[in-house]
Amino acid sequence: MRFTFIGCSFTVGVGLDHEKNDVNNYTNIVANHYSADVKNSAAGGNSNCNIFMTAVNEILFNTPDKIFVQWSNLNRLWLYPGPNTKLVLSHTIKTDYGYRDIFYSKKELQKFTDTYHILNHDYNNLITLINYCNILTEISKNKTQLIFINGLLPWTSEISSSDTMGNFSKNLSNYTKEILEFNSRDDNELLEFFTKLNVAVLSLNQSVWINMFNSFAKLAVDVGTDNEHPGPKSHQQYAEMIINYLEGHND
């Protein structure tokens, strides 16, 4: 069997000594359990757009037996100032950035990134992500088993229930209130925006998700050598979740 994993630094195994090649990386634990050949196409700081495009190419041109797509933060962006370099706009900027005549200090780049994130709203990013999922679900039919993994998605389960509309103030999570701009909208506006999101979420095939609303980030039980990313105990837990899922979905 051939397994392909796509994702961000969680799937790379950042925080483990040997990252993609580390025996403690959840991808290798799962592959070894099934004596499968493993291809790890994850990249640190990966955006969901890049993850989607990588998955499309893997399904159409490599067609592994199983493809695991780990979704990342909603508003990451990769910029390409040159043909052989990229700039990742993530929430935390750690260093200055320079390329040819372009230079941003760490502080300047953080301000630029924060401005981008304000302009790049999670609500519409969620709708886009749902479109990615539905496209991948369609093109993978009769080709490969598709499995989605929530690596860093912050969405919460009440958006998948129409009962939530009975009392927005009580039923919405803080995150959903934030993306709906709860405090600045009237009831009709809230209903309109929530209904669009709810319909989109219900269009998903939830049976192909390992952990739709409980991200790997939330489920981590230890940290790796970088004191930031999941450690070996977390990876073991992730692998057990995936194996348990696969045992119940042998088709």
Image (cartoon, grey):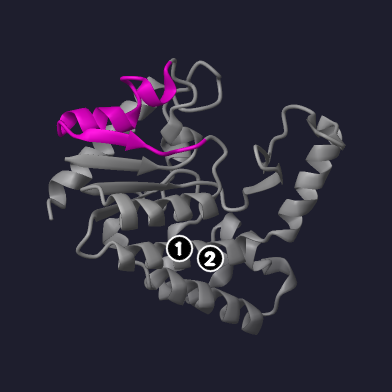
Q: Residue furthest front?
A: 83
User: In terms of image quadrants, where is residue 59?
Assistant: bottom left
Quadrant for the N terminus, please: top left
Q: At 15% from the left edge and 31% from the top edge, which residue is drawn?
A: 35
Measured along the vertical axis of the image, is residue 74 above or below residue 110? below
Q: Is residue 98 left or right of residue 232?
A: right
Q: Which residues are magenta?
A: 18-43
Residue 69 percent across, percent down from the top left: 38, 48
Whole-number angstrom distance, CA of label 1 to CA of label 2: 6 Å
Give whichever of 192, 9 is nearer the camera: 9
Task: Answer above or below: position of 101 versus 63.
Answer: above
What amino acid type is highlighted by mark number 1? Tyr
Q: Amino acid at mark 2?
A: Thr
* Residue 25 belongs to magenta span: yes
Q: Which residue is mark 1?
A: 132
Mark 1 touches mark 2? (CB < 8 Å): yes
Tag 2 residue = 128
Residue 25 rendering spot, x and y as whole percentages: 35, 26
**10 Å neighbourhood of mark 1: few (<14), some, or many (≥20)?**
some
